[in-house]
Amino acid sequence: MKICVIGAGYVGLVSGSCFADLGNFVWCVDKDKQKIDMLNNNQIPIFEPGLKDLINKNYSSGRLKFTTNLNLAVKNSDIIFICVGTPTSNKKGSADLRYVYKVVAELSLYINKFKIIVTKSTVPVTTGDKIEKIILKKKRKKLFEVVSNPEFLREGEAIRDFRFPDRIVIGANSKIATKKLKSLYDPLIKKGAIFFSTNRRGAELIKYASNAFLATKISFMNEISNLCEKTGVNVEDVSIGIGLDKRIGSRFLRVGPAYGGSCFPKDTKALTFTGTLFKTDLSIIKSVIKSNEKRRIFLTERVKKILSNKIKNKKITFLGVTFKPNTDDMRQSSSLLMIPYLHERGAKINYYDPSGEKKEFSRLKNVFFCNDINEACEKVDLVIIHTEWDEFKSLDFKKLYRKRKFKIYDMRNLYSPRDMKKQGFSYHSIGRQN
């Protein structure tokens, strides 16, 4: 099939390259000329394992092209995927849809034959209705169908999630569009993906509801970990015990920092805003948002306690600063609150992250990026394991300890408190007896 993917960001690049890998011809469009030039010169603007090789393979085959020419891409495609950003606006946490509507207004000028226009961007309920109205100002209804096809890609696991999805959700008010998209996804369906079709509004809400529920599981378990610390219970036993209930499941029951990234923070806020528009009080999700905000503060206060409330002139190392491993995404990472807070109180901060140096900390005088773990942990008072990158799961603390003994705050519970204590380390974790 001939496909146009609008937006060469995270979702667009992964989806476009994966569609091409399934044998389709894909135009990937972005108005950012610098980004398109990078892609045409074998440079990938985002950090995602396996993506560079996948893009190279399909670019070389001619199935994947990058351009700034939306007119060319739309006219030469049958299915158009909208994959632009929908960040949180300043208006009470609602989704900022200006980029979606701008793209729709422009592409409507170039529709020359029947097109299926698909929103992969995460958008609130009724967005598809508004998209349809915008296009109707320029084109007759018989020339297009508007469909919702939410993405469920995890950063760091996106290619695998595309190739082996739990489900493919299509929200369409047309049997023709549903049939066409089912045909597009047929190679994945044959490998076991469940194909689920509903109406357009249903698909739009499924995406938000999914993210809100997963965010709820994370916040719930983080709060339980607080109780575990005060009652002498191992939070990992609780997590396993409730996760074995098939009605609950074990995923997203691990404790750690507040949830972050590009989806959960903005989508929970946008969903509560939608609830307000439809005069529905989504009190549970509002509580999840508040709990997550408190989590960042709680863990920062814990650092103060570990250091006996003496932060000034302390040297602190952060191992990992991204919100999760296998991504360079810093959005809503707990480190964005913790590092400036400690810096303002006189601490000297080292950090090492496999995805590289972060511009977010470049203006902080006593915050330094280190090129490796040994450099980061040299002569420090506290090491904080913030992100569970694989290389942090088997650290040789005895070797790191030689030059200076430091305290360890394992915010991801990567190590056993008993083993760490036996080795003589001052070790602190979450929801467990240290």
Image (cartoon, helix red, strand yellow):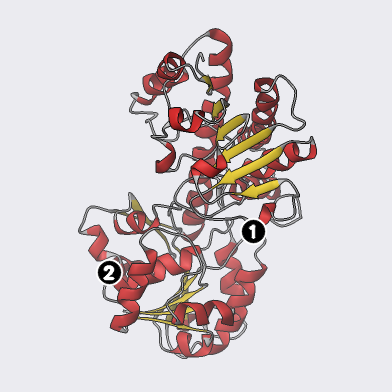
Q: What x and y, as percent, mark residue 380?
A: 61, 33
Name which quarter of the figure residue 160 lies in: bottom left
Question: Does residue 61 appear to the left or right of 80 in the view shown?
Answer: left
Q: Of 353 and 95, which appears nearest the observer?
A: 353
Mark 2 nearby-residue class (10 Å; few <14, some 14–19, many ≥20): few
Residue shown at the point (47%, 27%) measured from the top left? 413
Give the mark, 1 or 2, whose residue is nearer the N terminus. 1
Between 225 and 181, the one nearer to me in the picture: 225
Q: Position of residue 176 (x, y in %)?
A: 35, 72
Tell me the residue at 73%/43% (across/down). Answer: 340
Specify few, some or many for label 1: CA neighbours under 10 Å numbering under 14, 14-19, or 20 or more.
many
Horizontal arrangement in the rendering, residue 288 relative to residue 326 (left or right): right
Q: Secondary structure at mark 1?
A: loop
Residue at 52 percent across and 23 percent down: it is: 429
Check the image and name the residue furthest to the top.
231
Residue that appears at 37% across and 28% down:
247
Distance from Cα at disc 1 to Cα at disc 2: 31 Å
* Spot occupied by residue 43 in the image (x, y as percentages of width and height): 46, 74
Q: Where is 381 relative to 39, above or below?
A: above
Say which residue label 1 marks: 87
Q: Is residue 322 above or below residue 220?
A: below
Find out whether the residues at labels 1 and 2 contact each other: C-beta distance under 8 Å.
Answer: no
Q: Nearer the viewer, residue 109 or 199?
A: 109
User: Callout 2, which amino acid?
Assistant: Ser
| Res. 183 mark | 2
